[in-house]
Amino acid sequence: MHKLFWAVGLGVVLGGVGPSVADGTITFQATLGASCALAVTTPGTLALSSGDTILGSEQTGGTAAVLSIITVGSSTVTVNPPTLTDSPGTYTPTGQQLEYSYTGLSGLGGVSSGGFTSVSKQFTATVLSALQVQNHIVNAQGFTTGHYATQTVVTCS
């Protein structure tokens, strides 16, 4: 009997009678900074105009590029004028004009460059957006046969 009393007394002191229940609070936290990611979903292609003076994505057979923009918070998107990154050695770039235009798609319905331009432009993007970008080279001297490439740099911050 003395042993039973000792075991019951020890049980009460160490944890009470029966199983114990503990509770805990789990806190989830996040600090979000503005961030932005860009991805080309459709690459652009250039095609020659019927007058042989414009090589552009807006010409028949050309394709506009589409860029996806994913942001946390709002981000400033900057579209820069295109540069000629490849052309045949026989091409004469004297007098050429490289220009671009853009139109907002999903999430950017009211955004537009207002036609072709050769100066950098900015706008604000939020959440998930898409941007259609056109690009062309205008040259009154025309184009020679060979490979041409332009590059339009878009950044977000």
Image (tube, grey):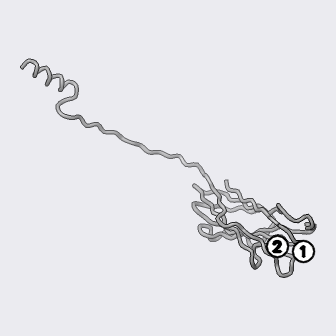
Lateral position of residue 5 relative to residue 57, left or right: left
Q: As rendered, which of 98 and 47 lies closer to the eye?
A: 47
Q: Quadrant of residue 91?
A: bottom right
Would you say the residues marked 1 and 2 are in contact, meaning their CB atoms lie under 8 Å apart? no
Looking at the picture, does residue 52 appear above or below residue 66? below
How crowded is the residue under tag 2: few (<14 C-alpha within 10 Å), some, or many (20+)?
many
Q: Amino acid at mark 2?
A: Leu
Q: Earlier in the sequence, mark 1 or mark 2?
A: 2
Looking at the picture, does residue 75 appear above or below residue 146? above
Image point (47%, 45%), residue name: 29
Q: Quadrant of residue 63?
A: bottom right
Q: Secondary structure at mark 1?
A: loop
Image point (90%, 74%), residue name: 142
Q: Which residue is mark 1?
A: 142
Q: Residue 136: give x, y in percent of width and height.
A: 80, 70
Q: Residue 105: give x, y in percent of width and height.
A: 63, 70
Q: As rendered, which of 82 and 122 lies closer to the eye?
A: 82
Image point (92%, 74%), residue name: 141
Q: As rendered, which of 105 and 91 lies closer to the eye?
A: 91
Q: Quadrant of residue 69?
A: bottom right
Q: Residue furthest top?
A: 2
Q: Residue 143: give x, y in percent of width and height.
A: 88, 72
Q: Amino acid at mark 1?
A: Gly
Q: Which residue is mark 2?
A: 55
Looking at the picture, does residue 69 appear above or below residue 32? below
How far apart, in angstroms, are the residues tagged by discs 1 and 2?
9 Å
**Image quarter in which the N terminus is found:** top left
